[in-house]
Image (cartoon, grey):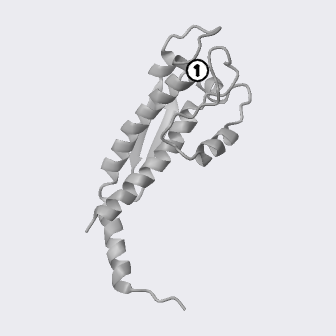
Amino acid sequence: MINLDDRALSAALARIEQAANDLPAIAERTRAETLGHLIIGANANIYATQPGAYRRTGEYLRSLHATARVTPLTATVTASNDAEYARDIETGETGNLMQLQAQAAARGNPRAAFTLGRSGINWALPGPVITGAQAFAAYRLRELFVLRVRAVR
């Protein structure tokens, strides 16, 4: 038998509804932090690695984007890169984006840059900059929303 306390359930629902009013601010903060994560990931996977065959122009870094979208009941943050070769960097020669997404989701610390050893020398390895930032954004949206729900009195 399950006993439900109507008052406690109503209070919890009210906290969630109040926290939902803060979704635009939560999404914007997550968007800004996700852009920072993208930059850290690009440095860890490209710019701070040993140089190799390709000239580093900074185009990949300039092509990073984080956008937020909010509806009355949802918040979404998207990490992307519109450089022509972004997918080649992201997936390397393996091209297995689904595997990278599973690895990013399973990591213990989504705040850290997600690297798999890619460098200017090892350019064929994946450099999951965007995938790592997407996992971070999902984690951070949840974290900030839960913190806001708990703060509502």
Q: Residue drawn at (34%, 43%), measured in percent from left and top? A: 28
Query: In the figure, 18 relative to 66: above or below?
Result: below
Residue type at numbered disc 1: Glu
Q: Residue at x 50, y 23 (%)?
A: 43
Kindly tell me whether residue 71 is visible in this rendering: no
Q: Please, is residue 103 above or below residue 71 in the view?
A: above
Mark 1 crowdedness (10 Å alpha carbons): few <14, some 14-19, many ≥20 = few
Q: Residue at x 48, y 49 (%)?
A: 139
Q: Is residue 126 left or right of residue 22?
A: right
Q: Quadrant of the C terminus?
A: bottom left
Q: Picture quarter containing residue 62?
A: top left
From the viewer's perspective, is residue 18 above or below residue 128? Answer: below
Q: Residue furthest left?
A: 153
Q: How many marks?
A: 1
Splitting the image into 4 quarters, where does residue 118 fall? top right
Residue position marked by numbered label 1 in the rendering: 84
Looking at the figure, which quarter contains the N terminus?
Answer: bottom right
Residue 119 in the image: state x and y as whole percent.
62, 19
**Residue that protrudes farthest toward the bottom in the picture:** 1
Please name the residue shown 57% across and 34% down the image: 114
Front one among 81 and 45? 45
Residue 12 point in image, percent of width and height: 36, 73
Does residue 90 show up? yes
Secondary element at tag 1: loop
Residue 105 location in percent, x, y? 59, 47
Residue 9 to residue 53: above or below: below
> Furthest-right residue in view?
94
Q: Is residue 79 left or right of residue 148?
A: right
Q: Can you give x and y, in whole percent of width and height, for residue 9 in the image?
A: 38, 79
